[in-house]
Amino acid sequence: MSLGALMRGEKRARSTSSQVHMSKDVDWQMLDKSRFFFLGAALFSGVSTALYPIVVLKTRQQVSPTHVSCAKISLAIARLEGLKGFYKGFGTSLLGTIPARALYMTALEITKSSVGQATVRLGLSDTTSMAVSNGAAGLTSAVAAQVVWTPIDVVSQRLMVQGDLSMSKHVPGVISSCRYTNGLDAFRKILYTDGPRGFYRGFGLSLLTYAPSNAVWWASYSLSQKKIWSRFTGPGGRKEDARGSVAVQALSAATASGCSALITMPVDTIKTRLQVLDAEENGRRRAMTVMQTVKSLMREGGFGACYRGLGPRWVSMSMSATTMITTYEFLKRLSTKKQR
């Protein structure tokens, strides 16, 4: 993505009439940073607000001891909890999303720019350089963001599942976490019962889930974008317009998201349960281990239980990626420094 302009500068002499003319990308050095972060917080908060109910459905399916359809969960929430049931933990999630997104975008753009320049010096091809720089950027940005996102996930997901009737069904050795009145109350109780490490339950699995998948997503996105655009423009090699650019970005994002959701679903389910559920031994509550979580899932429904919530997660990831990437590209252009 961000290497397109840099690569074309070095390879313009070898261009042919059939070359795909992708628009010049906005690099890190070209951005007005204060505007970038301010507008980014506003735009991404809006996207998170729209997609949050799907995340609630996905989380409830993952921790349910039996398979419950999204339709039944949605109706139950609407009937028993009202609209606010779809936004449990949203305040906590939104509060953490802003710094996490800032970390994510900073790491993404800086890594992409640095690795991109290094691959050019190494003489790698345009396609290879784009894949390598975007993959490296996806990896580092995911690791940076998880430092903030994991504690926010732990708190917000516990709030999400409160009021879920399926959680009252008894599963031997597994209990739901204690009751919380709000995000601050959850923070205090987790700190009291588990200490600071309680906020990083599933941190290793979060990295295992998001770091590789993020690297693959960004690499796949850059390659998909180039491939789809080459088909979209046809042999004439016409320049892209604004509508065509958004369409290609959205389709590329959705393509990259579908496979990522399918591959990482079992690990995400285990991670979510680690963060939300507790084990009970001799009447005492304590954090579950990965092995206990896996055994519990196998008892409940075999390997298929690891894919509970796949539908909402697939939809959420595809919609999120599509809206996020188009918003992100739009944000970068809004934040470009004015040329003097």
Image (spheres, rainbow, N blue to C red):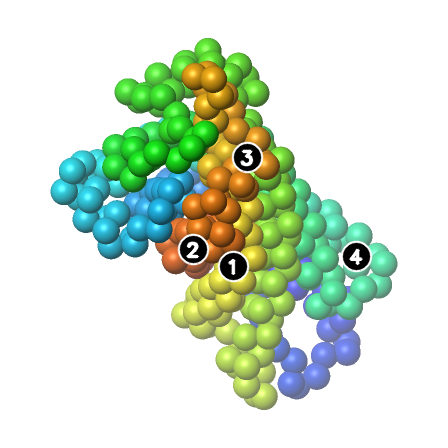
- Nearest-to-viewer mark from 3 and 4: 3
Read off the residue under disc 1: 262
Sequence-wise first label, 2 or 4: 4
The mark closer to the camera, 1 or 4, is: 1
Q: How far apart are the two marked residues, 1 and 4, measured between alpha carbons? A: 31 Å
Labels 3 and 4 touching (C-beta < 8 A) = no
What residue lies at 53% left-to-right and 41% top-to-bottom? 295
Q: In terms of image quadrants, where is residue 96?
A: top left
Q: Of the two numbered discs 3 and 4 on the same chain, state the one appearing first in sequence.
A: 4
Rendered image: mark on residue 310: 2
Q: Tag 2: residue type? A: Leu
Residue closer to the observer: 212 or 269: 269
**In the rendering, at what x and y percent does residue 181 appear?**
28, 20
Residue underneath mark 3? 292
- Say if mark 2 contacts mark 3, CB within 8 Å: no
Mark 4 highlights which residue?
A: 119
